[in-house]
Amino acid sequence: MDRPRPVEEQDHASSRSANLEQVSPVPFEEIYEQHSPDIYRYCLARLADPAAAEDATANTFMKAFSAYSRVGPASDGVRLWLFRIATNVVKDHHRRQSRRRRLVAALVGTVRVGQDPEAQAVLGVELQGILDALADLPSRERHLVGLRAGAGLPFSEIAALMNMNENSARVATHRALQRLRTAVEANR
């Protein structure tokens, strides 16, 4: 015959099930939908090539998906975990490439419906100038620009990814962006 459990055991059992609900992982599809635009922009800023950035983004999420159940990153740490993977994917890309690829010429010539073709061409030339200047920056500065301008990360997350304190991340990022602005202005 089953004896009723004491109230304390019942409360403990219900709190255990509540904890299990809190620990359950976020579906990977949601993680992808939430973070893929930032990862793509970061990869684009680091690689200066839309096709390579798409490949790097895909590789980042393939690696993340295969490790997700094993690693089980905390929901508040998923973003940094993804950026660490993306950083490694970008580094692997650079190792395989003997030189950086430039922005695809078709991007400059692509006309969007409803936009003036001349304005579109000017925008493409300006974008190419920015990407050229970005490609000339040292790797660390490209990394900082990619994290801040490309992915829009706050300085606290940049600091965590770059293994520095937040103030150092803020100063280094400001200097990298200023150096990029100066290079773009000089090439005009």
Image: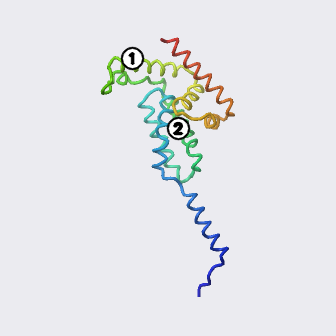
Residue 100, given in percent of the width and then of the height, sits at 48, 24
Alpha-carbon neighbours of circle 1 within 10 Å: few (<14), some, or many (≥20)? few
Circles 1 and 2: CB atoms closer than 8 Å: no
| Quarter of the picture holding the N terminus | bottom right
Viewer-proximal residue among 174 and 44: 174
The residue pinned by badge 2 equals 86
How was the colour assigned to the protein in this rendering?
A: rainbow
As drawn, the residue found furthest toward the bottom would be: 1
User: Residue at the location (52% across, 11% down)?
Assistant: 186
Residue 53, given in percent of the width and then of the height, sits at 45, 33
Residue 157, given in percent of the width and then of the height, sits at 61, 37
As drawn, the residue found furthest toward the left would be: 113
User: Residue at the location (64% across, 38% down)?
Assistant: 160
User: Residue at the location (67% across, 73% down)?
Assistant: 8
Viewer-proximal residue among 89 and 113: 113
Kind of element beneath mark 2 = helix
The residue pinned by badge 1 equals 122
Position of residue 117 in the picture relative to residue 75 (left or right): left
Position of residue 175 in the picture relative to residue 67 (left or right): right
Q: Amino acid at mark 1?
A: Val
Kind of element beneath mark 1 = helix
- Residue 61's disc is none
Q: Amino acid at mark 2?
A: Ala
Quadrant hosting residue 140: top right
Q: CA distance from mark 1 to mark 2?
A: 31 Å
Between tags 1 and 2, which lies in front?
Answer: 1
Whichever of labels 1 and 2 marks the residue nearer the N terminus, that label is 2
